[in-house]
Image (spheres, helix red, strand yellow):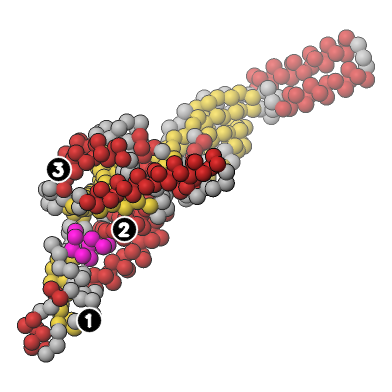
């Protein structure tokens, strides 16, 4: 039943009010009923309607995309249609309803704008088609499954930092020897000595010929290995700022991948919890960042503990060459002590290991509250947790393992700076 039938019923009350009585009411009700029945048989069925969805291109979270719904009238009747192109709520569909009149053999397309609010493969819902006649009193409705999905990549908001980080890396590479000659550096050129240069870089023979101090400059080797391990266990599912810890880890991984591949290094990314969820490599990728984004799009944290023995074995299988292994995980004292530290000797015997963690901004806010007694006790607990995390980082430093911890929006830049320092000092 449509709104027109409801309005017709209201109009039928007018003669009943003008000429009160059962005969008038029965005649009016009969006319309305006959009109509704006749209209029901006049409404064409939608069995001859063909539907096809064409999703738009994959986009990054924060960008808009679209989907095109094609309607083809394969029947012998004119179709007056009201169409609802429904999508999952996180797809952010805009203006999903439309009206169309299709003659036999006609085709039309409906473009639905989508504003995704979540990363991943977002599936389409049912297409609901409502057919009516000229009278429009009664409509036939059918919901049809038309499979389609749009792929929403991680946002990669930290890409705005990539030009400055790349320029910083180039500037530092162009300086002296990278300050210290480390393992895996190549001789570049000679230049005059300046205050602050490492005396071990002085070339005494060249200095004797030039009658002035001359130092060797070194540049980092290309084609080094970087392995990024992203923890997708239950700790990664924790809300942190506007997203989750896993979202911040993906951002840091994307920026480090873009920076390292731009510097000529090979990057492998492993996402794992109780099992290995995804592995991506820049070895044969034309666009490593895009390929990594596509590989990580369907992965979400699972409520399991991470199996660090399996993760360590996967890292060792990924590269026999010495590599920089970045563990992006939760800097939780119990987890690090019981799960990560036992496998670190296996990793550090072959690779250089770095641990990166996400600071909880809410914990930082709690530590700054000093309103009443309850807030003071809460702030003390927050301060204790922060001191515990700093103590853990000091313990890792004592084991020769560098670590970095920052707020979600600052972690990608902080991890990139650590990579640059290791790169230019020959630590990679």
Mark before the other along the chain sequence, 1 or 2: 1
Looking at the figure, which quarter contains the C terminus? bottom left
Front label number (2 vs 3): 3
Q: CA distance from mark 2 to mark 3?
A: 25 Å
* Horizontal relation, residue 167 to residue 203: left or right: right
Q: Position of residue 49 (x, y in %)?
A: 51, 30
Q: Earlier in the sequence, mark 2 or mark 3?
A: 3
Q: Give the structural element (helix, strand or loop) at label 1.
A: loop
Secondary structure under tag 3 reads helix
Question: Is residue 145 at least partly visible in the picture?
Answer: yes
Height in image: 4 above or below 118? above
Q: Which residue is mark 3?
A: 346
Total labels drawn: 3
Q: CA distance from mark 3 to mark 1?
A: 41 Å
Q: Is residue 9 left or right of residue 41?
A: right
Label 2 secondary element:
helix
Residue at x-position 77% and y-position 26%:
7
Circle nearer the viewer, 1 or 2? 1
Q: As rendered, which of 411 and 301 lies closer to the eye?
A: 411
Choose between 111 and 371: the one closer to the eye.
371
Q: Is residue 106 left or right of residue 357?
A: right
Q: Which residue is drawn at the image coordinates 57% and 38% (left, top)? A: 96
- Can I make out residue 65 in this image? no
Of all residues, the one furthest to the top in this rendering is 22
- List the residue tagged with mark 2: 416
Tell me which segment is drawn in magenta: 420-428
Q: To which residue does mark 1 refer?
A: 194
């Amino acid at each position: 039943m449509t709104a027109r039938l409801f309005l017709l019923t209201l109009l039928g009350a007018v003669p009943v009010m003008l000429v009160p009585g059962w005969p008038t009411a029965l005649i009016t009700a009969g006319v309305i009923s006959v009109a509704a029945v006749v209209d029901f048989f006049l409404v064409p069925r939608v069995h001859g309607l063909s539907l096809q969805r064409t999703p738009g291109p994959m986009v990054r979270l924060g960008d808009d995309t679209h989907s095109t719904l094609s309607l083809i009238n394969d029947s012998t009747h004119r179709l007056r249609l009201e169409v609802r192109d429904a999508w999952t709520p996180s797809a952010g569909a805009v203006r999903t309803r439309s009206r169309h009149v299709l003659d036999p053999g006609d085709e039309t397309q409906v473009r639905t704008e989508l504003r995704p609010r979540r990363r991943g493969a977002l599936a389409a819902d049912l297409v609901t088609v409502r057919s009516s006649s000229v009278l429009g009193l009664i409509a036939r409705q059918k919901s049809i499954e038309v499979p389609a999905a749009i792929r929403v990549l991680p946002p990669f908001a930290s890409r705005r930092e990539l030009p400055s980080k790349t320029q910083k890396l180039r500037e530092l590479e162009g300086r002296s020897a990278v300050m210290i000659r480390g393992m895996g550096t190549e001789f570049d050129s000679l230049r005059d000595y300046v205050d602050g240069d490492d005396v071990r870089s002085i070339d005494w023979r060249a200095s004797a010929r030039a009658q002035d101090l001359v130092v060797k400059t070194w540049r980092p080797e290309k084609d080094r290995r970087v392995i990024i391990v992203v923890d997708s266990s239950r700790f990664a599912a924790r809300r942190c700022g506007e997203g989750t810890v896993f979202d911040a880890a993906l951002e840091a991984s994307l920026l480090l991948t873009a920076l390292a591949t731009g510097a000529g290094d090979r990057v492998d990314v492993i996402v794992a919890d109780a099992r290995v969820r995804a592995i991506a490599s820049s070895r044969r990728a034309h666009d490593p960042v895009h390929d990594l984004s596509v590989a990580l799009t369907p992965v979400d944290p699972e409520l399991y503990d991470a199996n660090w023995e399996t993760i360590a074995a996967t890292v060792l299988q990924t590269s026999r060459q010495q590599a920089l292994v970045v563990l992006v995980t939760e800097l939780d004292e119990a987890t690090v002590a019981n799960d990560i530290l036992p496998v670190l000797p296996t990793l550090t015997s072959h690779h250089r290991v770095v641990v990166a963690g996400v600071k909880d901004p809410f914990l930082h806010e709690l530590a700054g509250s000093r309103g009443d007694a309850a807030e003071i006790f809460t702030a003390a607990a927050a301060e204790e947790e922060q001191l515990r995390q700093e103590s853990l980082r000091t313990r890792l430093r004592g084991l020769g393992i560098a670590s970095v911890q920052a707020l979600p929006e600052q972690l990608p830049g902080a991890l990139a700076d650590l990579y640059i320092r290791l790169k230019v000092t020959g630590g990679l």
